[in-house]
Amino acid sequence: MAPGSGPNGKALVEGYRKDIINGFEKEKPRYNPMNNEHPQSSPLVDLKDPVQVHLLTETALSDSKGYEILSQEEVDDLKKQIQSLTMRVEQARTNLAIQSKYRDAAISMAKLYSPAKPEGSKRLSLRGNRLSDSAKEAEMERQASERRCEELATELFNLEKRLIEPQRRLLQHTAGILQMTHRASSKKSSQPLGPPMPNGIPGSPESLYTYTNPRNSLEASNAEADFGDRSLYLPLDQMEGQPVARQRKNTIEIPMKSPIREQNNQLRGEMDRIKEENAQLKAAQQRLNDELQTQRTRAEALEAQNESFRTEMEAFQAQNESFRTQNEALRAQNESFETKADAIETQTAGQTRMISEIESKLEVLNGKLRDVIIGLGPARSIDFDQPERATGSGASVMRQLQYLERGLDAAAEERESFAAGMMKDSESAAAAAAKSEVLLAQTEGRIDGFIDQLQDALQQANVSQPPAPASTSLNDQLDYVEKAIRVIGDEMMRAMDAAANSASNRQGDDQVDAVLSGLWDIIQNGLFDAQQQKASRRKARAEKGLEPDEEDMSDSEPVDPSEPYSLPAFSTKVQWLFAQATSLKEQKTVLKRQIKQQRDLNSKSGSEKDEVIRAKDKELSAKEDELDRLQELLDNTEREAMEKQEQLAKAIGDMERMQKSNAANDSRALQEQLNQRSAALAALEASYEEIDSNYREVQAQLSEAEKAAAALKQELADKEKEVKDKDEELERMNVMVIELKTELTFAKAELDGAYGSRRERAAEAAALTQTTELENLNKQVVNLKAELASTLRDFEDITRESISAEKEKIELEAKLDDAVAARESLEADANAARARLEAEVARLQELLDAERLKVPNSPLPGGMGAAGPRAGATMLSEQFRATMKEERKKFQEELREEQAKRRNLEEEMRALRRGVGPGRSPLGPLSPR
């Protein structure tokens, strides 16, 4: 039969579920203690009963007539085939049992990652998309396990179906051989109940000439036809053709009828009655003796069994108490394991959250680093895309670190190019410094002329002048210009106030206007001259083929010398002059600082510059090595965190399975089992009381039977005396009996048939009357034994479950110790990494500060050439320091919390170990969870 034509895989797995749970244990053979020779028999059959044995034998022989008989080679082939298939079936059963365990574990894992559960939704919110991937993997693993179980169940079903055919053929061959070689026993009963057959021929006239045995293999054969060793070597046709029984010669001829038949009949009837009564009395006496002995034996067995029941009940009660104690201890340990699992899960959630935050901060740092790199070299924007978005689960930490490493490499390249450009810029910086000095001298000259013009204007206006500059430095001159402009502004304000207060001061106003008009002309002429000088310098540089000077190209306002004087225009011009003076002052400060830095840089020799560059290269390589070490440390930390997370998931799965098996099964099932045991104990006590009462009744019946036996013995003695008298009378009448022997034989055969039927019915009635109570007692004994066997099986199951729970507890404790040790090692590694990171950050900060002071600004347009990268690097370093400070603070807080939790867990473990010590005996009732 093809495998596809049978039932489907799911139905086969469900059909094998009970066998998988029982470990494919073979069905226990039935036991019948009444059949001593064949105890493995049905309790409904009594092999001591010849009628049942005869019927069973006749049925078996009749059913096995048409069975096929095989050769020895075919029998050997079938046995080899059965042995091979049996080995394959056992292997398939073992594989199915193991795969079923894998399937149950996969189902538990799928339920663990299922989002329908509250704890599952909590973990989902913490782990994000990672849990959904784990749930998909668990679901795929569950489906694969179920599919594998279905395939194994189908294979096992096909193998068992193939095994049935050779077993059937071999059994039919065995039954056919036994049926063919079977012959009925030729031994005759040593004590027949009926009268002896004269000359071996029954006395029935009907059976005198027709005595045969129509049952083929059950017919009684004579001495020559008995089945013996010699018949094994005879051919089958000769065995089947042998006469079953020889024709018996009838040597007694039928006599003629006698006139005294009636008298002979009476005597014959009386004699038969006496013999029948004698036989009945002997049979009754023997039966009563046997029954008495049987009752005594059973009473002793019941008493011993009762004592064993008492002992087993006491042992079972003690074991119940021990199981209750172990259940309480296991429940306490389960609660402690749940607390520890929650703490570990919280710790893992905190570590996951910290990894997620590190991932987000790495994303921010990568973005800022990209901005800095693009600011240093806009052409690198092609190589550096936007950094990967943080997933929140820590999966992109490695890619973020790789991006950061690429950015640092690019920054190192920019630094090298910048160091190479520094050598080129140093030459142009010297020229720029000389040019700056010339420009500074020109500016000082122009400011001196402007100061002279301001002094002349203030003298003409009769205005109090500020003190002349003490030196010719640019700062003192600009300070003087600023004060003079402030004085002019004050005079203008006073003039405006005076004009508004009174019209009589018009002459003073005219003087003020004249002074301001003179100042206006001076300012306009000075600015016009400066504008012409710039134009001439640009023209001269253009004729020489040089690039225009930045000072000459500065965007100053064009001056119109013909612009008329007005007070708003004068005020605007003065404000512009003040702004120009302030800008010149700032430029002077910047130029002085650049000149000083350039002089310091130029004062160094070429070898010192090379040494500085080599030192910078070494520092950069050291930083790269340290970055590699930090990245390796972070990889190890992340890998260990993943391992700890997997161990935690496994511990959580084991914990949930243990909780399900212990909390659900142990509490409810044990409670139900205890209730059942209590009910069984009550039933056993009731049965014991009933057996005790039955035992007392049996003892009373035995005493009555003994009395009846004594009475029967007395009656038997009387009957024997009467028999002796009748025998004497019979001897006297022997002569008349000889004459009527033929007729007596005929009548005796008929009467034997009739009395034999009545005798059998009487014997059956007597046996039924005497054995009813014994059968009831036997049934009660069988029931009690069955209940005891069930109780022992339940006790073995409970013991097995307790041992498995203890093993699981030891495994969980070992896993918990491993997790604690791993966590301590992880904390030590994190502390070491944090210390190294802090030292490296401090060293990098010092180097960054030193570099910021050493490296000069490049003279880019607008004076902002070096300020942008330096400002970006400064901002990045400050943000990095702030981030690391927050991380250190947060990590220290989490470390303190974990240490506090660990101390609490250690205290709880010590308390639990003290609580479940040898001195404690919790005998309280179980509380189902």
Image (cartoon, helix red, strand yellow):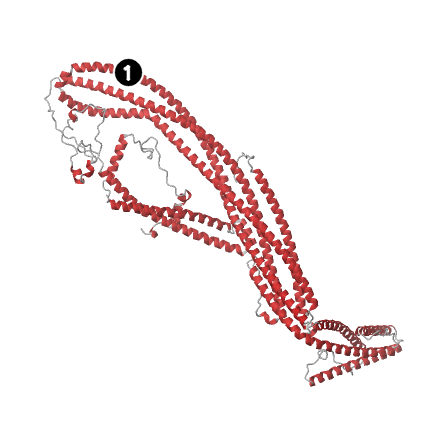
Kind of residue sitting beneath label 1: Glu
* Residue 387 seen in render: no
Q: Is residue 174 left or right of residue 481?
A: left
Please give left or right for residue 184 compared with residue 153 in the image. Answer: left
Q: Residue at x 60, y 52 (%)?
A: 827
Q: Name the residue carrying label 1.
A: 715
Q: Is residue 47 above or below residue 885?
A: above
79 versus 486 height, above or below:
above
User: Which of the 4 quarters of the picture holds residue 636?
Assistant: bottom right
In the rendering, at what x and y percent does residue 631 appear? 58, 60
The residue at the point 70 percent across, 67 percent down is: 853
Foreground residue, 594 or 587? 594
Looking at the image, which residue is at 26% across and 20% down? 282
* Residue that appears at 30% across and 25% down: 767
Q: Which quadrant of the view contains residue 446?
A: bottom right
244 or 416: which is nearer to us? 416
Number of residues whose C-alpha sits closer than 10 Å to that of mark 1, classed few (under 14), some (14–19) or many (20 or more): few
Q: Relative to 64, say whether 781 is above or below.
A: above
- Residue 356 picture quarter: bottom right
